[in-house]
Structure formats: C-alpha cells, structure tokens
Amino acid sequence: MLNKKAVLDVLYGDEDYEKAWGFRLCVFDGSKIHLPNTPEIIQEFGTIKFETTVGNNKKITGEHGYALASVMYDPLNKVVVDACLAPFMRV
C-alpha cells in the first residue's frame, strides 16, 4: 500500500512516464527462496523435500522451508510495481 501511494500514484498519475509503443512495460520474475528451518517459518510457508547424492553415492534427504517470491518491475521507469512473498505450495 505504501509503494502504491508513495511511488506508483506519483509516477503514473500524470501519464508523464516512459512507455513502449504507448504502453507501460512490465516484466515479471519469480523465485523459490530457501528459508531457515524453524517451526514458525515451516508452518507459515511450507517445505520442499530434497534428495542429493554426495561422495560415494551417499544419499542425503530432508526438507527445507521455502517461499515463493515474485516481482513485477517497470524497467523503463526503474520502479517495482508489486512484490510478493507467498507460501510454497506442494504440487
């Protein structure tokens, strides 16, 4: 909400901003974020299971806390339009 009032309303309010072919250009990026393994974080964001092989075919398995991050960015005006950190959903 602060980003909308303090940045976006001011930047986009008067239509005087950089455009591509007359349109506002926005790009999106998303990532999985590895979080510390605490009960509170795992309860809030969830986990993802992993399995890896090291050395002489020794398998290591476990779970880590993870979240999903996404950002919508306006590269022409160099401003983040929206960002979100959400729980990791197991599929």
Image (cartoon, rainbow, N blue to C red):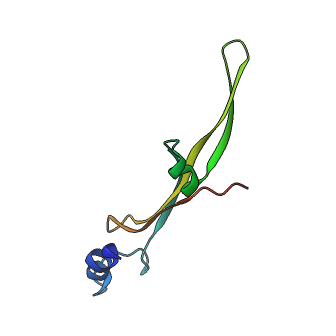
| Residue lying farthest to the front in this orientation | 39
| Residue lying farthest to the top in this orientation | 56
Count of all numbered marks drawn on residues in the image? 0
Residue under the point 54% across and 57% down: 44
Residue 55: % across, % down:
66, 14
Residue 10: % across, % down:
26, 81
Q: Is residue 33 above or below residue 23?
A: above
Front position in the image: 71 or 49: 49
- Picture quarter with the C terminus: bottom right
Q: Is residue 17 above or below residue 87?
A: below
Which of the 4 image quadrants contains residue 13?
bottom left
Q: Is residue 52 left or right of residue 71?
A: right
Residue under the point 32% across and 73% down: 3
Residue 53: % across, % down:
69, 23
Residue 39: % across, % down:
54, 47
Q: Is residue 83 left or right of residue 48?
A: left
Residue under the point 56% across and 48% down: 66
Residue under the point 32% across and 77% down: 8
Q: Is residue 59 left or right of residue 81?
A: right
- Picture quarter with the N terminus: bottom left
Q: Is residue 50 left or right of residue 13?
A: right
Front position in the image: 30 or 59: 59
